[in-house]
Each structure stands twice: as structure tokens, then as C-alpha cells.
């Protein structure tokens, strides 16, 4: 059965009715609460826990600007990040990857509500965030998710309503099979603390939740936990990865104690995901070349079995505990089946820092480069599609500045039409290469745009204005 067919099945699932009352944040936390032994890692707005020091704050422009805050309650603002989960921007620049338990509480594999994505990226006004709201119908939950977290399939791909800001890092997914033993970087907006004291909820920054990072190693797939001495129920075979929280001693090496997988952790100390990090990535590689290999799912604490224990502290997220991540390489078909579908391209200048917030004229170039479609803003590459035949239509929206659209696509734009709304300002459209295959629908709320053509006259349709061709 084709990926496209599966995608239509997921997209056509009944979305929640708009008349259904949205649960309060307290109700959502109650739904998400689990026993201490199995904790979904969201609910409280806190950050990555370090061995002997708090998780490292990433800051902007350090390669982690594609790790996004996911606000299920949708109360974050441009100056305050109030999120429950974490997500990652995929290589398309139009999709995010996160955990199913963040968006579907009743286990019907349909998102319960819309969600807000918070971009904390380099170049944004200091302390400010960019926001996008994703309709529930565009949040695609894995069809085998049933809200029993140890049964796995805890993964979601959601389609953004517009192209993400160019300043947000894009991450491809890891497609190999050698994750075990590899050091990975975990990043999220969850709780911070230390392995001695456990997670703490007093570390919110001046603008809300803070993004932090740290390193650990995947010890095994979770299948091993089903055997003695823990005898834990686990996700489907080969679909999840487990790490432990080491302090450098044998007594707190959980996987070494229980299963003989001795690894005392990083010399500088391990880091472990905490509540609020759910849905965040486990990244393999280095900044600029990161790939998503894991998605934070749940933690296992208070491990007492057969008189063996490595977690003697009742505080949550202390040394000797385990964390489980969904194994991304086991879900490549699910992810590709969504990201590789035909789509309507929507590019909005209000999301693009290179052409917004400054009051100056902006130039947008829609061009063909080799086989790819590119969009440049003031000379900077803001979007690229290597398979432009997937594009069904193109919509470009301006900002409050004067926006000048240049179309240089001699073979005719994908989808056949560019819809351009310059919004406020004095706007223009220029056809750099004349071609009768291009069709442009122009809408502006601030006077008549100027339509320039070079070579063969190209069709232009104007709405509620008089188009001037010069």
C-alpha cells in the first residue's frame, strides 16, 4: 500500500470538533501524570538534568535553533515561552517531529487539539519568539499509538502552516542501525537539576522556559528490559532505545548492574531528559550535521527488583534511573510517508527575520537553481525544495515593509500559479525571465503593485486593484 494512501488515511481521520472544550493546563497535567516508575517527560516546564551541574543552556545560533518548544496549551506569547513539550524541525523546513503522548491523551491516534510551536532563534529581537499554530488536522499521530506509553509508537509528524524561519536549524533523520554506544546530544525545554538533587522546577528564565542540552549514550534497545531482573513491558522489538544516568560509579550504573552492559558514563558526567523534554531530539553528529536518532518518550525511576537497585533516591531524575527514546530509524517509512507528499507551499515574510522587523524594502526572489526551487530574501537563501514537482501551488505573503517579488523561473513555476499578497507597503512583481507558463495572482492592501515583465508578457491577475505593467 502506498505512502500517499497511508498519509490520506491519517489526514482524513476525524479531527476534534471545535465545540469540544479545551482542557485546562491542570487537567492536562492530571491526564499526563503517571506512577513514579513510568513518567512521560513533559507536564512541568523545566529542563535537561545534568550529573553534577545543570544542563547547559544552548543560547541562540549554536546549532540548536531547530529544537522548538511545543505549547499544547497555546498560551505562549512572543515574549514568554510557556510550553509542555519539545519538538524538532525536520529537514523539509515544513514539518516537526515530536512525541505522540504530547498531543493525544485518549489513545485514538488523533491529535486532541491544535498546538503552538515556539521558535527561539538567532536574529530574533532579543528575548522575543516567533510563533506558529498547527491545526489538529495537520498533526499526524502514528496509527499504532494507543496512549499506553510502554507499548511504544510514541511519535508524531506535524506539518507547519508555513515555511519555518530560515534561522531555525533543519535536521535530517538518522537512517542507520548503529545508534547503540553512540554519544548523543539531548536537547529540550524541560526540567533541570543534578543527578544528586533530581529535577528542579525553579529554573524558568526571564522569558519562560529555557532550552538546554547535554550528552549521554544509548546502552541498548529496550527489548533487553523485558528480561530478568526487571521484566519490564517494552515497546515493539527494536523500536526504542534506553540510556541510564551514570555518576561514574558501579553502584549507579543501571544497565551494568542489571544486564552487564557496563558503561560508567561520560567523563564530564551524563545528562538525562526530564519532564518537559518529551518529544525532544536525541541528536547524533555535530552542529551543522546533526541527525535525529531518538525522540524523548518516558523515564523509569525507583528501580527495585530482585533486591537490586541503582536508584536509591526518591527524587525524580536522579542517578541510577533510565530514560527511553523512540528509535527514529524504526519509523523512517512513517516519517517519509508524510514529508514526501505533494503540498501547497506557503512562504510568509512575517516569519522571516532577514526581511522583517526593520522597516526597509525587501526583495524576494523565487528562482530555479538546477533542479531545485529556491526562495531568497534579500540575497539570503530562505527555502529550498529539491523536488519541486511536489509543489501544488505557491503562496507568498509580504510583511509590513515594501516587498518586491522577482520571479526567475523560465520553465514555469511548479503548480502553475504564484499567489502574492504584498500586504502593507509599496509592492512590486518582476518577471526576470519572461515565460508564458507563469501565472501570478496579485493581491495588495496598500495601493497598486508595479508589474514588471522582461521578454514575453506573462499572465497577471489582479484582485481589487488596477495592475500596472511597465
Image (spheres, rainbow, N blue to C red):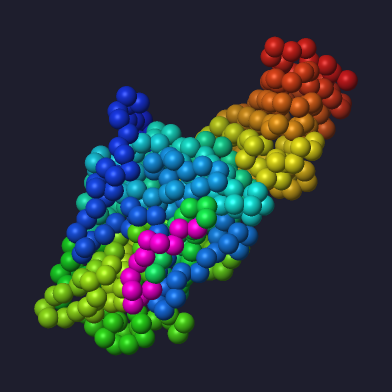
Q: Is residue 165 above or below residue 234?
A: above
Residue 423's spot in the image, x, y percent? 69, 26
Position of the N terminus by quadrant: top left
Residue 62 vs residue 432, the one in the foreground: 62
Left or right of 394 in this view: 308: left
Q: Which residues are magenta?
A: 194-205
Judge from the rendering whether residue 428 lies leftward or rightward of residue 285; answer left or right. right
Q: Residue at x 70, y 20 (%)?
A: 445
Whether residue 180 is visible to the viewer of this picture, yes or no, is no
Q: Is residue 386 magenta?
A: no
Compared with residue 359, is residue 448 higher up or lower down, i.e. above or below?
Answer: above
Of residue 127 and residue 160, the one placed in the foreground of this image is 127
**Between 430 and 83, which is closer to the camera in this rendering?**
83
Residue 81 is situated, as x and y percent measured from the top left of the image, at: 49, 49
Q: What residue is shown at x 38% (from left), y 73% (from top)? A: 194
Dividing the picture into quarters, in which one does residue 273 lie? bottom left
Is residue 201 found inside the magenta-colored segment of the image? Answer: yes
Is residue 127 visible from the viewing direction of this image?
A: yes
- Position in image of residue 363 (x %, y %): 78, 37
Question: At 78% across and 12% down in the image, what residue appears?
Answer: 466
Tell me which secondary structure the magenta stretch mostly adopts.
loop
Quarter placement of the C terminus: top right
Q: Which residue is pictured at 22% across the width and 78% down the height?
A: 312
Amino acid at each position: 500500500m502506498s505512502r500517499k494512501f497511508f498519509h490520506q488515511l491519517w489526514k482524513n481521520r476525524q479531527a476534534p470538533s471545535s465545540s469540544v472544550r479545551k482542557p485546562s493546563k491542570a487537567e492536562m497535567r492530571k491526564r499526563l501524570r503517571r506512577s513514579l516508575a513510568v513518567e512521560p517527560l513533559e507536564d512541568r516546564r523545566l529542563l535537561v538534568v545534568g550529573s553534577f551541574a545543570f544542563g547547559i543552556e544552548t543560547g541562540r545560533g549554536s546549532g540548536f535553533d531547530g529544537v522548538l518548544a511545543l505549547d499544547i496549551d497555546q498560551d505562549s506569547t512572543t515574549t514568554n515561552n510557556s510550553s509542555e513539550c519539545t519538538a524538532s524541525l525536520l529537514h523539509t523546513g515544513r514539518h516537526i517531529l515530536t512525541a505522540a503522548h504530547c498531543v493525544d491523551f485518549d489513545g485514538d491516534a488523533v491529535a486532541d487539539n491544535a498546538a503552538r510551536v515556539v521558535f527561539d532563534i538567532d536574529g530574533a529581537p532579543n528575548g522575543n519568539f516567533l510563533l506558529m499554530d498547527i491545526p489538529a488536522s495537520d498533526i499526524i499521530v502514528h496509527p499504532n499509538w494507543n496512549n499506553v506509553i510502554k507499548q511504544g509508537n510514541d511519535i508524531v509528524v506535524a506539518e507547519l502552516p508555513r515555511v519555518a524561519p530560515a534561522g531555525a536549524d533543519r535536521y535530517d533523520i538518522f537512517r542507520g542501525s548503529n545508534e547503540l554506544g553512540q554519544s548523543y546530544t539531548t536537547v529540550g525545554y524541560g526540567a533541570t537539576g543534578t543527578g544528586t538533587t533530581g529535577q528542579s522546577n525553579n529554573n524558568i528564565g526571564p522569558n519562560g522556559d529555557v532550552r538546554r542540552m547535554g550528552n549521554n549514550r544509548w546502552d541498548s534497545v529496550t527489548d533487553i528490559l523485558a528480561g530478568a531482573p526487571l521484566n519490564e513491558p517494552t515497546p515493539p522489538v527494536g523500536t526504542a532505545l534506553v540510556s541510564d544516568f551514570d555518576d561514574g560509579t558501579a553502584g549507579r550504573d543501571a544497565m551494568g548492574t542489571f544486564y552487564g552492559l557496563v558503561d560508567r558514563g561520560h567523563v564530564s558526567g551524563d545528562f538525562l531528559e526530564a519532564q518537559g523534554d518529551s518529544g525532544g531530539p536525541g541528536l547524533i553528529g555535530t552542529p551543522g550535521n546533526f541527525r535525529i536518532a531518538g525522540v524523548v518518550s518516558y523515564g523509569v525511576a525507583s528501580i527495585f527488583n530482585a533486591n537490586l537497585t541503582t536508584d536509591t533516591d526518591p527524587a525524580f531524575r536522579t542517578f541510577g534511573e533510565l530514560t527511553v527514546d523512540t528509535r527514529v530509524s524504526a519509523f523512517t517509512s512513517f516519517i517519509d510517508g508524510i514529508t514526501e507528499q505533494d503540498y501547497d507551499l506557503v512562504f510568509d515574510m512575517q516569519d522571516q527575520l532577514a526581511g522583517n522587523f526593520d522597516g526597509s524594502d525587501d526583495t524576494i526572489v523565487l528562482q530555479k537553481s538546477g533542479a531545485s526551487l529556491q526562495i531568497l530574501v534579500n540575497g539570503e537563501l530562505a527555502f529550498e525544495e529539491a523536488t519541486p514537482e511536489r509543489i501544488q501551488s505557491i503562496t507568498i505573503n509580504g510583511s509590513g515593509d515594501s516587498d518586491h517579488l522577482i520571479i526567475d523561473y523560465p520553465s514555469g513555476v511548479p503548480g502553475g500559479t504564484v499567489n502574492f499578497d504584498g500586504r502593507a507597503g509599496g509592492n512590486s512583481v518582476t518577471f526576470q525571465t519572461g515565460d508564458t507558463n507563469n501565472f501570478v495572482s496579485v493581491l495588495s492592501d496598500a495601493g497598486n503593485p508595479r508589474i514588471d515583465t522582461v521578454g514575453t508578457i506573462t499572465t497577471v491577475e489582479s484582485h481589487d486593484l488596477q495592475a500596472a505593467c511597465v
